[in-house]
Image (spheres, rainbow, N blue to C red):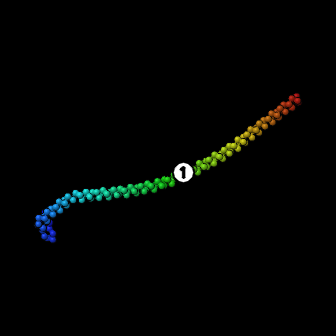
Amino acid sequence: KVIETDERVCTRPGCIARAQRLDELQSENEPLRAQLKTIEAKCAAAKNKVALTENANAMVEEKNDELRAQIDETQLAIQTAEAEASRGDSQNQVLRNQLAQIQKEIEKLKAQTDEKAKAMQNLKDKATQEVI
């Protein structure tokens, strides 16, 4: 192949050899350039994937933060409910104790009433026997 420069053709043997070597190198470089374009495209695709992954991770982290906040609120509500239940249990125990005390008094009063009723019955029976 002959190289034309400024409308002149270099016909010297060194020029021709250099031109041929340049053509060979350019021919050898063509597949490398194609590979480079492929690699650049893959790099761009990888960068896009990384960006998409980072965006997805950011969204997931945001959602996780929201869920953590909900969990914290729920745990606080559970603790509050447990504290209220504990207070309720304590109040119920106080009321049970009072009820037990009142029931003892009722039993005592029933026993006294039964005793007085028997005594009255005995007096009636004695009075009836004395009248007869």
In-image side of 40 versus 57 (left or right): left
Q: Is residue 56 above or below residue 95?
A: below
Judge by depth and name the residue closer to the eye, 39 or 118.
Answer: 39
In-image side of 92 versus 35 (left or right): right
Quadrant of the image containing the N terminus: bottom left
Q: Secondary structure at mark 1?
A: helix
Judge by depth and name the residue closer to the eye, 59 or 6.
Answer: 6
Q: Amino acid at mark 1?
A: Gln
Residue at figure coordinates x 31%, y 57% from the top left: 43
Give residue 56's position: percent from left, percent from top.
40, 55
Give residue 18's position: percent from left, percent from top.
15, 63
Residue ranking furthest to the front:
14
Residue at figure coordinates x 20%, y 58% from the top left: 28
Judge by depth and name the residue closer to the eye, 120 or 28.
Answer: 28
When asked about the image quadrant of residue 42, the answer is: bottom left
Give residue 36's position: percent from left, percent from top.
26, 58
Give residue 30's position: percent from left, percent from top.
21, 59
When asked about the image quadrant of residue 53, the answer is: bottom left
Residue at figure coordinates x 88%, y 28% from the top left: 132
Q: Is residue 71 above or below residue 131?
A: below
In-image side of 26 versus 104 (left or right): left
Residue at figure coordinates x 78%, y 37% from the top left: 112
When asked about the image quadrant of residue 59, the answer is: bottom left
Q: Is residue 59 above or below residue 6?
A: above
In-image side of 68 versus 47 (left or right): right
Residue ranking furthest to the right:
131
Count all numbered tags in the image, as a single digit.
1
Neighbours of disc 1 within 10 Å: few (<14), some (14-19), many (20+): few
Residue topped by disc 1: 75
Q: Is residue 105 above or below residue 30?
A: above
